Image (cartoon, grey):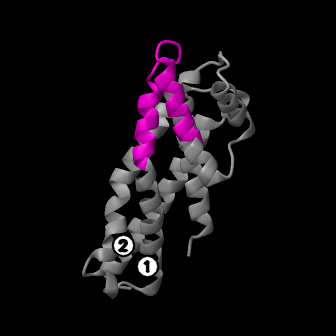
Amino acid sequence: MSQVDAKVAKLVGEAKNGLRRLEKDIGAATVGAAKGRLDPAKATAAAKKVNAFLSKFTPVAKISSSPLYPELSEETRSGVDWVQEIMGVLLMRMGDLQKAAKGAKLDPQKQRDKWVITVKVASKDAKAEMGGLPPGVGTLVKQIEKGIDVDAPGIGALPLVIMLLLIAHVIKKGWSTMR
């Protein structure tokens, strides 16, 4: 194994470890969602960690288009390809996550119309990708769509939590495709 191959393999390993940590951080931010307990601070922190992860490991994904890529071992190239694949999906969802973060800053009482639209968009994307929402979250979304005034702690963070659940789903799906 060449030095370059070893360095790239180490970067791929760091990206995988970072993804595991990110998955745990998202889980901690969304754990109460099924029971209607949303923590805006944890959700915002998890969203920032998703952004930081993408910033840190995007260069690993770009290795596949560099001139040194063909010189890497098959195993290392496979790891780079996997990182590139999952990073591509996460980057596509980053815009949605940022919109949801802005929606989470809206006051559901004062800016209800804008907030409800943000919830609907986030839940539509999540339902399409995940095949449905977790039970407690799905119930909250249905109540909001029906116009029922939901008085749950941290309800303003619902769009952000939904997008974090979607990103957690993408990560979980990514692990199953790991080569």
How far across and down, in percent of the image, does residue 57 sit? 37, 58
Residue 81 in view (yes/no): yes
* Highlighted range, magenta: 94-123
Quadrant of image for the C terminus:
bottom right
How far across and down, in percent of the image, does residue 80 sit? 42, 73
Residue name at image x 34 percent, y 75 percent: 64
Q: In this view, does 53 lie above or below 120?
A: below
Q: Which of 25 and 135 is in front in this view?
A: 135
Residue name at image x 56 percent, y 35 percent: 120
Residue that numbered label 1 is attached to? 76
**Is 72 inside the magenta-drawn segment?**
no
Residue name at image x 48 percent, y 12 percent: 110
Say few, some or many: other residues with alpha carbon within 10 Å of mark 1 (under 14 / 14 to 19 / 20 or more).
many
Q: Is residue 8 left or right of residue 82?
A: left
Quadrant of image for the N terminus:
bottom left
Q: Do callouts 1 and 2 mark residues in contact (Cβ within 8 Å)?
A: yes
Q: Is residue 7 above or below residue 160?
A: below
What secondary structure characterizes most of the magenta part? Answer: helix
Q: Quadrant of residue 47?
A: top left
Residue that numbered label 2 is attached to? 8
How far across and down, in percent of the image, does residue 159 sit? 53, 33
Residue type pointed to by label 1: Thr
Residue type pointed to by label 2: Val
Q: In this view, does 114 lie above or below 137?
A: above
For marks 1 and 2 on the same chain, the one whose residue lies earlier in the sequence? 2
Label 2 sits on a secondary structure element that is helix
